[in-house]
Amino acid sequence: MRKIFIIFGFFLPDVINAQVNYESGISGVYEVILAVDDLPYSVTYWNQYGFKIIDSVKIKADASQNLYGVNSSLTIYRLQNGDIDSHGLLRLWKWEKPLGPGVGYSEPETIGSRMAVMKTNDIMRLYDIYDFLRGNKKPWLPTEPITDDLFGLNKGDKDFIKRPVLVRENAVYGQYFNHVFFQRYGYEIPGYGTIHPDTPLKTSEFTHHDWIIPGKDMISLKYITEVLGFKAENEPEINGDWQKGPKRVFIMRDGYTHLYQGFVSPNNICGKLKFFIPLAPKPDMSEFQKLGQLGITMHSLYAPDITKIRSKALNHPGLSVSKLQKNEFGENSFLLQDSSGVSWQIIEKKETKHKPQNKVNFIFTNN
């Protein structure tokens, strides 16, 4: 029998009410924007994860200079996973003259690196693939999957019949992309990872996203709530090697900690933001996070009216804000960059075909 348990978000209401005082209409993360060196191979690679091209365009160097400050022609593909058009898409960029190699293959929690997360139905298969490739001297670093009770849902006695509710997760670090995968056992959350049956590797759209940023505190991220309108899931907190999931995923050495804060859109439980500041020495590759470099250099968000968001951004300290103009797909947009090197494209979009969930429903399956 399937039981339904409703929780109104992952966050603490007192934290939210203290930090959000207006409704921006903002989405969760709409797109990961990934610059690649081999576009045909990248399309084939992402096809295996269920992402298919839904739009494409090529712009000349003067247009990309005007939009992104990079004097290079640019070929762009927008890809979508299954029917999910409200969040978790992928935009591939191929610069004719990239500015550099990007952050590249680097150790976990390198400052400037980014990670994107997908649900899967077979995490061990994915681990075996990347582990095999690593054994053949390919630049992939998969962490062995580990299970945890992330939400404290295993109350009372659990046994073989009343099975534990768990999630298994791992990371795969690569040259141009850092993956995180998770697989659920004993529960589902509708709207938070949808796997299309035709997807070769049984994986969903992107569900949430990680940024490794420089600094000593999260003060530079105040704009996430005050300008963009996200809700803080928590006050900034210290995470460390005592947490078995993060210890394995980030390959934390004993005694290591980082500062963490998460944010979620009030309009979509998916497309969450997670920021990490290493509290021990890590390589700093922030200079390779600029537009024009390879790798993940920007993410996009959308809202039905972006003028108020832009107005707030212009009046918020520490933000660099571009003019309002059409992006390569003809969408009203502007760019926003914060002092830690995080870049956004804010797109005006009235609605999507897929209606995102704005409340978290735990459906227990006992599988």
Image (cartoon, helix red, strand yellow):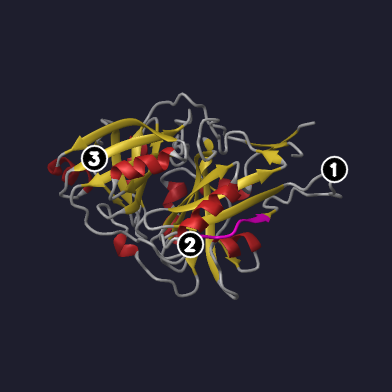
Identify the residue at horizontal 52%, vertical 40% (top origin): 201
The residue tagged 1 is: 161
Residue 234 visible from this viewpoint: yes
Labels 1 and 3: the sequence-earlier one: 3
**Outermost residue, front direction?**
136
Residue placed most toward the observer, 111 or 102? 102
In three-dimensional space, the C-alpha distance between marks 1 and 3, rounded to whole angstroms, equals 54 Å
The residue tagged 3 is: 75
Kind of residue sitting beneath label 1 = Ile
Q: Position of residue 358 (x, y in %)?
A: 57, 34
Q: Position of residue 20 (x, y in %)?
A: 51, 45
Residue 311 visible from this viewpoint: no
**Outermost residue, top direction?**
353
Picture layout, residue 78 above or below residue 291: above
Kind of residue sitting beneath label 3 = Thr
**Outermost residue, left direction?**
62
Closer to viewer: mark 3 or mark 2: 2
Which quadrant would residue 305 be assigned to in this image?
A: top left
Check if mark 2's residue and mark 1's residue have beta carbons within 8 Å: no
Labels 3 and 2: the sequence-earlier one: 3
User: Which residues are the magenta region?
Assistant: 142-147
Q: In the image, which disc is placed on residue 135?
A: 2
Kind of residue sitting beneath label 2 = Gly
Closer to viewer: mark 2 or mark 1: 2
